[in-house]
């Protein structure tokens, strides 16, 4: 069965600091992996996705993630945090390309 | 182009009542999925519909049902509401690609409160 584990329910960084949000997945077949962001009282917005090919994936707003099969990881990074990055971030996996299985989410706080 | 739209935005019901939530997909998208997001948790998959047929179902009781209409819009129905059904209900639409992953685009959600 597929599953997603997001390490750290809450991450706090200073503005300008590196952002690292961790995601590990479990899947019996090569997975499709996604990161979504959710701002307060809003739906989910796609940040980036991994399907096949290049393992380093670039997304919107300066975020990127690297698929590491040997570590079953898909961590999300951003070199320099902005105040506007404060939100809830969800990692998700899909094996058959249909239903998404989400992690519990990581709340990112950014301080000035 | 308009994104995924959902109605109503907020809803308050009492235990035992019935509720219907509505979703309109992005133009050209023929697949609609429903998710339940309880406060502090990630979204949980409820249903997926494609071309008016149920394509997948999550681990939810039979009180939950859905359907898709010829214009690809969808309704989620929940009967005999329980307090635990209080959540944000998200609808997502996607293109169905042969042999490929589907990127799901989410609407703003309907926040349901059961008293």
Image (spheres, rainbow, N blue to C red):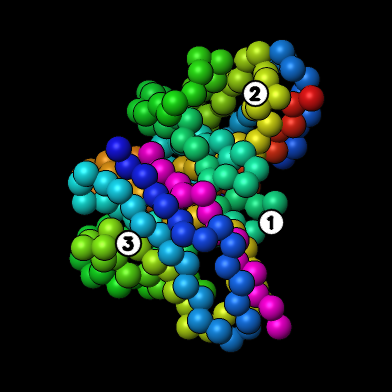
- Whether residue B27 appears in this view of the structure is no
Query: Which residue is the site of mark 1?
Result: A40
Please tell me the numbered disc located at residue A73: 3
Structural distance between the alpha carbons of marks 3 and 2 = 38 Å
Can you give x and y, in whole percent of width and height, for residue B6 in the image?
63, 39
Q: Please say whether residue A108 is one of the residues in the magenta stretch.
A: yes
Can you give x and y, in whole percent of width and height, for residue A108 in the image?
60, 66
Disc 3 to disc 1: CB gap under 8 Å: no
- Give me the residue at 74% from left, 17% from top: B15
Residue bounds of the magenta highlight: A99-112
Q: Are marks 3 and 1 on the same chain?
A: yes
Q: Which quadrant of the view contains residue A107?
A: bottom right
- Give me the residue at 61% from left, 20% from top: B78
Indicate which label's residue lies in the foreground, 3 or 2. 3
Task: Name above or below for residue B30 compared with residue A88.
Answer: above
Please tell me the numbered disc located at residue B20: 2
Question: SS at mark 1?
Answer: loop
Structural distance between the alpha carbons of marks 3 and 1 = 27 Å
Task: Name above or below for residue B13 compared with residue A92.
Answer: above
Give the crowd class for mark 3: few <14, some 14-19, many >=20 residues within 10 Å.
many
Task: Name above or below for residue B97 compared with residue B81.
Answer: below
- Front residue of A20 and B79: A20
- Quarter of the figure with the C terminus of chain A: bottom right
């Amino acid at each position: 069965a597929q599953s997603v584990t997001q390490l750290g329910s809450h991450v706090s960084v200073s503005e300008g600091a590196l952002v690292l949000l961790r995601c590990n997945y479990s899947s019996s077949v090569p997975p499709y992996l996604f990161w979504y962001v959710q701002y307060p009282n809003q739906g989910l917005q796609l940040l980036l996705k991994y399907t096949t090919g290049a393992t380093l994936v670039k997304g919107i707003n300066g975020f990127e993630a690297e698929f590491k099969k040997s570590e079953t990881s898909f961590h999300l990074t951003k070199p320099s945090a902005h105040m506007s990055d404060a939100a809830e971030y969800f990692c998700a996996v899909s094996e058959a390309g249909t239903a998404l299985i989400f992690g519990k989410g990581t709340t990112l706080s950014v301080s000035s | 182009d308009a994104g995924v739209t959902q109605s109503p935005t907020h809803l308050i019901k009492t235990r035992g009542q019935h509720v219907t939530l509505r979703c309109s997909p992005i133009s050209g998208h023929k697949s609609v999925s429903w998710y339940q997001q309880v406060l502090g948790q990630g979204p949980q998959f409820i249903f997926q519909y494609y071309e008016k047929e149920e394509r997948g179902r999550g681990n939810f009781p039979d009180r939950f049902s859905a359907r898709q209409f010829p214009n690809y819009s969808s309704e989620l129905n929940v009967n005999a509401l329980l307090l635990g059904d209080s959540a944000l209900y998200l609808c997502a639409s996607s293109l169905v690609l042969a042999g490929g992953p589907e990127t799901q685009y989410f609407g703003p959600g309907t926040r349901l409160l059961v008293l």
